[in-house]
Amino acid sequence: MDAPTFFAQLNALMKDNPPSSADTSAMKRFAAVGITPGKPPNLRQYDLAVAEGLEQSVRAGQAKIAAEAQKPLGKNVNGWDVMTNLGRYGTKL
């Protein structure tokens, strides 16, 4: 998925699933590059460096998710990765 598609979907999904108030400072920074709940982003309005940075962020995020998916996330029980810390969400980066 390319950056325009990713951020368009992200913005659309955040309309009905708003960010936590703990994310207010991050959302203010994101708004500077068009990442805002419910608003379609126009990445072409930004200079080339910003647009390329957003594209790189999508690729880096995909790589990080793939790498994290390879790590055990819980306790191995009969070959199953059993997670015991589910439901603890926050602003961990």
Image (tube, grey):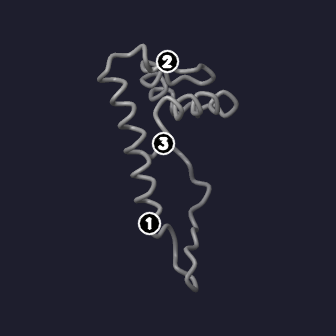
Q: Quadrant of the C terminus?
A: top left
| Nearer to us in this view, 16 or 66 | 66
**Label 1 SS:** loop
- Vertical position of residue 76 compared to residue 56: above or below: below
Residue 21 percent location from the top left of the image = 57, 30
Marks 2 and 3, the one that precedes in the sequence: 2
Amino acid type of the residue tagged 3 in the rendering = Thr
Earlier sequence position, callout 2 versus callout 1: 2
Q: Residue furthest left?
A: 49
Structural crowding at the residue carrying mark 3, measured as other residues with C-alpha within 10 Å and reported as few (<14), some (14–19) or many (≥20):
few
| Residue 34 spot, x, y in % from top left | 48, 20
Say which residue label 2 marks: 42
Between circles 2 and 1, the one closer to the viewer is 2
Relative to 10, residue 59 above or below: below
Comparing marks 3 and 1, which lies closer to the viewer? 1
Residue annotated with mark 1: 70
Question: What residue is rendered at 50% in x and 25% in y?
Answer: 35
